[in-house]
Amino acid sequence: MGVPVLLGAAWMIAGMAILSMLAYREFARVTGLADERTVYYPVYGGILALYFAVIDNWYGFFAALVPLTIAAIAAITIMADRPAGYLKRVALGVLGFMLFGAALANLAYFANDRNYRPLMLMLFVAVELNDVFAYLVGKKLGRFTPKLAPHTSPNKTVAGALGALLLTTLLVSLVGHFVFAGTVLAQPGWLIVMGMLISACGQLGDLMLSSIKRDLGVKDMGDVIPEHGGVLDRFDSIILVAPAMFHLVNYFNGVWLDQPARIFTGS
């Protein structure tokens, strides 16, 4: 994802849109949602609409699409006239849309900010190193502490989680000082909060996907990357970080305010 980020805003939004659709496709396949056409395709439609709102920099439409798409999924599924399993189909569709559409699209919306490149690179590096920190600290000190969630991910330890929390917070505090220079978020207190948020949400995203895989009884969500599983197996840690970081930065600094709004649909 570093390549489209560096190439430009449109490239980044396109890259995130492709990532969202690939991630949803893997989720739909392993859960059986891909066979439920009245849910499967409306979710795709909602994801595409979200990314149109992103590239148009139309925040009002972007925010409205979440409840509207959920309502559409619930309504269109009725047309199959199959009450049995209705709740499961709608719940899976809404979960897929929220995680792989709405959540990841929040990350794409950063492209509408003038300062998006250093921010996005910091996020990707911090989330990736958060996993590395958890692994290394857990390997060295894990035997001295309990397992973090033994039924969900047997290899994760409390030591690894706390080590990642500490090291990622330190990393984000150092790098974020330059990324957010001259803004409220450059203050040490908010940088510490940001680092802890990225670390905690990254680890929870990883555990969330592990929970899904355990529930379904599968080892990997896909086979796109040989020996490493699917797209979701590589990008699970960013899913919950995306909305958390977007709303934190948007609340204090604003994300799209320094760029033209409604590029295609405005007057």
Image (cartoon, rainbow, N blue to C red):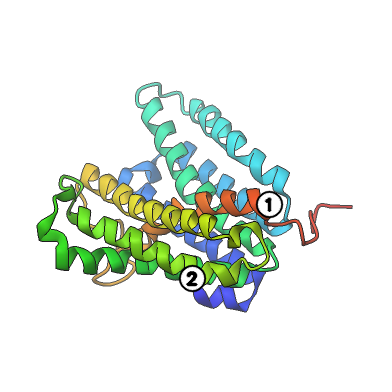
Q: What is the spatial separation of the Cα atoms under label 1 and label 2, in whole angstroms?
A: 33 Å
Q: Is residue 205 above or below residue 168?
A: above
- Given the image, on which type of amino acid does mark 2 rest? Leu
Q: Secondary structure at mark 1?
A: helix
Q: Position of residue 220 (x, y in %)?
A: 25, 58
Asked whether the viewer can see residue 112, the reply is yes
Asked whether the viewer can see residue 233, the reply is no
Left/right of residue 46 with respect to residue 125 in the rendered view: right
- Given the image, on which type of amino acid does mark 1 rest? Ala
Label whose residue precedes the other's in the sequence (1 or 2): 1
Q: Residue furthest left?
A: 143
Residue designated by label 2: 174
Left/right of residue 78 with respect to residue 61 in the rendered view: left
- State which quadrant residue 69 falls in: top right
Residue designated by label 1: 53
In the image, what residue occupies the spot 62% across and 60% down? 110
